[in-house]
Image (cartoon, rainbow, N blue to C red):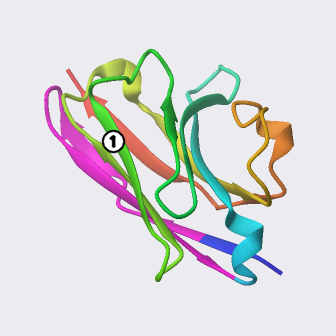
Amino acid sequence: QVQLVESGGGLVQTGGSLRLSCAASGPTFSSDTMSWFRQAPGKEREFVSTIFRSGGSSYYADSVKGRFTISREDAKNTVYLQMNSLKPEDTAVYYCAARKGYGSGFRRDYEYAYWGQGTQVTVSS
């Protein structure tokens, strides 16, 4: 069984920064692909960023490209999301997700078998 534990959310002013962490436990192949999604009030959950194991490729939603950076430490089975130049529209609950394999479809939340509990990020104007 894979468990994902997120940390690092909070309240920050516009233009500020936060770093989210997500630690995965369980079989390492179950977290070949690790991603961040977010869900704002009244909106559907949306893709934010993905990174593959062992220095593989990373991808970003257009809305965060150039401001957010995803990284991972495979030895710790942990993924990070460094968020800079935060905007009020970044306010949401951020979820870590993991899945086995590296196929396409990583932007779709239903492709993921494992999810964290979510961490709130609030950006004040």
Q: Is residue 21 above or below residue 82?
A: below
Residue 53 position within the rendered picture, expressed as x and y whole percent measured from the top left: 57, 61
Q: Is residue 49 left or right of residue 106?
A: left
17 up-or-down from 25: above or below? above
Q: Out of 114 and 10, give the one closest to the viewer.
A: 114
Amino acid type, residue under disc 1 in the picture: Thr
Looking at the picture, tell me which residue is in the foreground, 40 or 80: 80
Q: Residue at x 77, y 37 (%)?
A: 109
Q: Left or right: 69 with respect to 28? A: left
In this rendering, would 100 be left or right of 40?
right
The answer to whether residue 8 is magenta is yes
Quarter holding residue 111? top right
Q: Is residue 94 left or right of residue 83?
A: right
- Depth order, front residue of 53/22: 53
Residue at screen point 64% across, 61% down: 117
Q: Position of residue 99 (x, y in %)?
A: 76, 57
Task: Tell me the quarter of the image containing the C terminus.
Answer: top left
Q: Quadrant of the N terminus?
A: bottom right
Residue at the spot of label 1:
69
The front one of 103 and 115 is 103
Q: Main secondary structure of the magenta part?
A: strand
Question: Residue sitting at 54 percent across and 76 percent down?
Answer: 77
| Residue 69 % position (x, y) | 33, 41
What residue appears at the point 19 percent right and 42 percent down from the top-left corner?
17
**Neighbours of disc 1 within 10 Å: few (<14), some (14-19), many (20+):** some
**Residue 121: x and y, percent?**
39, 43
Tag 1 secondary structure: strand
Stretch of the chain drawn in magenta: 5-25
Residue 54 falls inside the magenta stretch: no
